[in-house]
Each structure stands twice: as C-alpha cells, then as structure tokens.
Amino acid sequence: MELHKVIIIGSGPAGLTAGIYAARADLKPLVLAGLNFGGQLMLTTEVENFPGFHKGIQGPELMQNFIAQTERFGGIIKYEDVTKVDFSKKPFKVWTAEAEYSTESVIIATGASSMWLGLPSEDKFRGHGISACATCDGFFFKNKEIVVVGGGDAAMEEASYLTKFAKHVTVIHRSDKLRASKIMQDRALANPKIRIEYNKVVEEFLGNDHLTGVKVKDLASNKSEERAIDGVFIAIGHKPNTEIFQGQIELDVKGYIVPKDGTKTSIDGVFVGGDVRDYRYRQAVTAAGMGCMAAMDAEKYLHLDQG
C-alpha cells in the first residue's frame, strides 16, 4: 500500500486551498473530495465577496478553478467519500468504499452543512431565492421583502444583518417564544424593519424558475396562506460533518473539531481547517485561509518528523 505524505479529507475552499499549498510544497497530496465535491459553494450562484473576482463568479465555477489549480501543481483528487478513519497509530488509515489509504498526516476539511427544513420545494430554490448565509447573499436582496426562518441567535443575527439591504424582514418561528439570547432578541425586536411571527411554519416554497412566494401555516388556527416574497434565509443551525471522526479526535459539544495551537488537533499529525472547526465566520475566504495554514503546518510537521 502506498504511503501518502498527506491526505486531505474534503474539497471546499479549505480542503482545496490546502491541496494547492501542499502540492506546491511537493507533498503530492491526495484529496479525497467526496462524491458531492466543492462544499457549500456548489449550491451558490453568484459569489461576489471572494477576492480577485471583481465582477463576481458562479460558485461551481470557482470550485472548478480550485480543483484545476490543485491538479496543476500535482495534487491528486479522487471523488470518493471517506467512510472511516483510524488515528490511533501511525501511519494513519483512511477508508473509502473504493479503497484503504495510508498516510503520514491528515488535513480535515469536511466543512459543516446548513440544516434545512426538508421540504420538497426547498431543493428547487436553493441558490434561486433560498439561502442559508446572509453575509454571502444578502446583497442580492436590496429593497426586497425577505423571510428568515428560525428563532435562535443565528436567526436574529441573520435578520438584523439583512435589514442593511432588505425593505423588510419577517422572522417566522414555530414556537411562541424565541430561543435566542436576550441581547439578540432585544436587538431584533427594537429594529423597525423586523417583524417576528410566532407559532408559524413554512409549508411550501412557491415559484417557477425563481422563488416568488411562501405558503405559511398558523399552528394555532391551523390555517394556511400564501405570501409573495423575494427571498428566504433558513437560519435553523449548522451541523459539522464530523460523524466519521467520533471517538478518533477531540470534538466540542456541538460536534466541531477542537483546534489546538492554530490548525493542530488533539492528534499529532492531524490538522484541521474551515467550517468543520469554525462556527463563527463560515466564509469561503476564511476557510481558504485556514486551509493554507493547515497545509503549511502539515509541511512543517512532516519536515520535523522526518528530521
């Protein structure tokens, strides 16, 4: 079995930036990109806040550029899903459905997934009126009517941020009380652009090629109504993609990987970057920066480990 110097698990901005830097360092990284490669940017249409693209770029096109740049410098990309890892001894082992791999170091960049409502019509309009990131997409909804779904801190933060652009923001929450901290509630309730509706749920998203409305059900009266709307932001939380690392590496109470001194983890030789460790910023540019750091830390580790 070939012994790799570094295996990168994940293929969003963090994983592929790590791939670029590791490849340029002549580490010949193996990037296990997964079948659904590219991370959350594959669900994004126009990206206008990634440096270097002053006219904007489509999310999938940006990720294809990352892939091409990684391969240009000798990175190996395989579109396989990692099913199991063993960090208990060296060399580390990584399994996919297709193969077993052995490596001297690992960079984890599996990201985090937005939690969605699970409605059939939701998939149709992701990137076409439905988003899970206000800082990514709020700019596109200037002077528009927007709905935010959720009742926690994330929902209040998204709603408050969106008032910079939106004509009006309606927060739809399924309970009669918000789950957000008091300071976040007070901030949202004091904002004249925000209206909060309790005991209501979104039943369906409406439109043809682009979102044009929502169907909202009142849980108290059991009555439903259709409303014209320009955009919806789902803010019910994120889930780090760390299931395969349970019991292998230190995770926090939310399931995020705990960083130690930069990109190091609780396992010597295993590094982390991107949204799988970052629940605060969740931006492509910050993920890319951490991917760069992880690759440089891995290169230093390999150099020192080999004397």
Image (cartoon, helix red, strand yellow):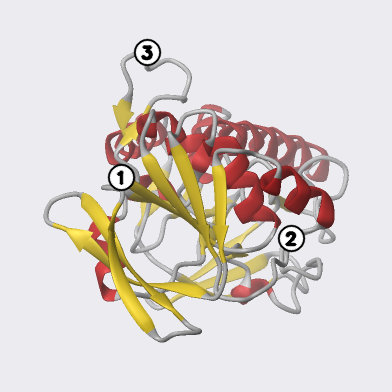
Mark 3 and mark 2 lie on one chain; the one further toward the N terminus is: 3
Mark 2 and mark 1 lie on one chain; the one further toward the N terminus is: 2
Q: Amino acid at mark 3?
A: His
Which of label 3 and label 1 is nearer to you?
1
Q: Quadrant of residue 223?
A: bottom left
- In depth, the one of 214 and 132 nearer the eye is 214
Q: Which residue is mark 2?
A: 180
Q: Which residue is mark 1?
A: 230
- In depth, the one of 75 and 277 nearer the eye is 277
The Cα–Cα distance between marks 3 and 2, rounded to whole angstroms, is 36 Å
Mark 3 and mark 1 lie on one chain; the one further toward the N terminus is: 3
Crowding at dot 3, Cα within 10 Å, few <14 / some 14-19 / many 20+, comes out as: few
Residue 38 placed where, x, y %?
39, 49
Q: Amino acid at mark 2?
A: Ala
Outermost residue to the right: 261
- In depth, the one of 38 and 188 nearer the eye is 188
- Secondary structure of the residue carrying tag 1 is loop
Q: Which residue is mark 3?
A: 54
The Cα–Cα distance between marks 2 and 1, rounded to whole angstroms, is 25 Å
Residue at 46%, 40% (x, y): give it. Answer: 168
Residue at 64%, 75% (x, y): give it. Answer: 176
Q: Quadrant of residue 276?
A: bottom right
Outermost residue to the left: 208
- Secondary structure of the residue carrying tag 3 is loop
Outermost residue to the front: 221
Crowding at dot 2, Cα within 10 Å, few <14 / some 14-19 / many 20+, comes out as: some
Q: Amino acid at mark 1?
A: Asp
Which of label 3 and label 2 is nearer to you?
2
Residue at 46%, 25% (x, y): give it. Answer: 50
